[in-house]
Amino acid sequence: MSDAEFAVDVQDLTKRYGDKAVVDALSMQVRRGEVFGFLGPNGSGKTTTIRMMCGLLTPDGGTGHTLGYDILREAQAIKREVGYMTQRFGLYEDLSIRENLDFIAQIYQMDQRRQRVDASLERLGLQARQHQLAGGLSGGWKQRLALAACMLHEPRLLLLDEPTAGVDPKARRDFWEEIHKLAAAGITVLVSTHYMDEAERCHRLGYIAYGRLMALGTPKELVENSGFVTWRVTGEELNQLADALHGRVGVSMVTRFGNTLHVSGESEPELDAAIAPFRLNQAQQWIPGKPQLEDLFIQLMGKAQDNFK
């Protein structure tokens, strides 16, 4: 794949604060026109990485390009073509939706302000609410307004930092429909999220923990190539079963999912040997199954070395 097909292409990206590497030699590529999911626990370095990619933060090491621009020498050019949506709603609550968008267009001295605002309102379905005060919007509509603000200058790349945090499930689903419409129109979207259902909506995923990229691929590839084996257990006394399985050779992880227990391991023979005595319990049903993304990411998080210890 040629460089022209990558919206983001970074190698050995590093950011240090004191003697701690918040981002540690991270290399990754985001293809043009794809929705790329960026996952990881709080403090893993996701936001710092995103800020380096869009020219808001200078890396201490590494090289890379965003939209063909050098992240070290052409940060200003990157900013002009990237829309960056932060975790917190940062618009003016005492202005209407239209007034917020018009104010932003005016501050950045955009040409054809009215046309840009009209197009952004239409693209995000905000025309009917354009005169409503931003402070009176629900969390989902605020996020949609924030996305409309990011689209005013018609960016080629959107960097969305946990855009649906604190938003109800329906609003999250609607927001993701908008993200995929933008991607279908040729806009590249890099989005960080904690939600596994959102991760499964992405074309490809990168998992970062303590500043290091630990997994990269499509949701299907990550699960199939994990080497993880999982059994699902239903029935009685699951809490006692979980306690008994923890720490056994061959059992990597035991996780509750509602009324089901997921028992996972990295070696099928070792896991089968570990669970064999427990499968004799007639009060429980053992069903072989594929691991879920959440199983994989919990396992990866457990393997990661904390860079603040």
Image (spheres, rainbow, N blue to C red):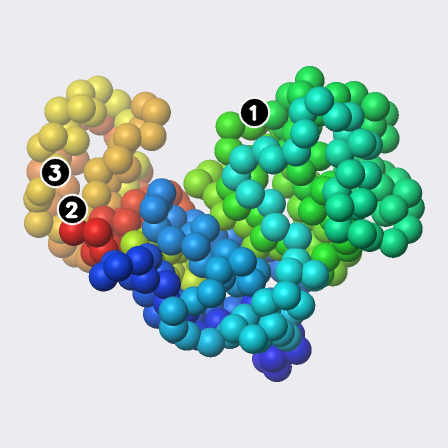
The percent position of residue 43, horizontal first and vertical second, equals 34, 46
The image shows residue 205 at horizontal and vertical percentages of: 48, 56
Disc 2: CA contacts within 10 A as few (<14), some (14-19) or many (>=20): many
Q: Are marks 3 and 2 in contact (CB under 8 Å)?
A: yes
Q: Is residue 118 above or below residue 305?
A: above
Q: Nearer the viewer, residue 118 or 304?
A: 118
The residue carrying mark 1 is 168
Indicate the amino acid at tag 1. Answer: Asp
Residue 160 at x, y percent in the picture = 57, 47
| Amino acid tagged 2 | Val
Q: For the point 33% across and 30% down, which residue is it?
A: 257
Residue at image coords 50%, 56%: 50
- Taking 172 as reference, is 302 left or right? left
Mark toward the start of the polypeptide (2 vs 1): 1
For the question of whether residue 225 can be seen, the reply is no
Gap in angstroms between the C-alphas marked 2 and 1 = 35 Å
Per the image, the residue denoted by label 3 is 246
The residue shown at (38%, 48%) is: 40
Q: Nearer the viewer, residue 152 or 243?
A: 152
Position of residue 103 in the picture relative to residue 246 (left or right): right
The residue carrying mark 2 is 251
Q: Given the image, on which type of amino acid does mark 3 rest? A: His
Q: Contact, CB < 8 Å: mark 1 with mark 3?
A: no
Q: Is residue 129 above or below residue 149?
A: above
**Is the residue marked by circle 3 packed among few (<14), some (14-19), or many (20+) residues within 10 Å?**
some
Judged from the image, the secondary structure of the residue bearing numbered disc 2 is: loop
**Quarter of the figure with residue 190:** bottom right
Neighbourhood count class around disc 1 (C-alpha, 10 Å): few under 14, some 14–19, many 20 upward: few
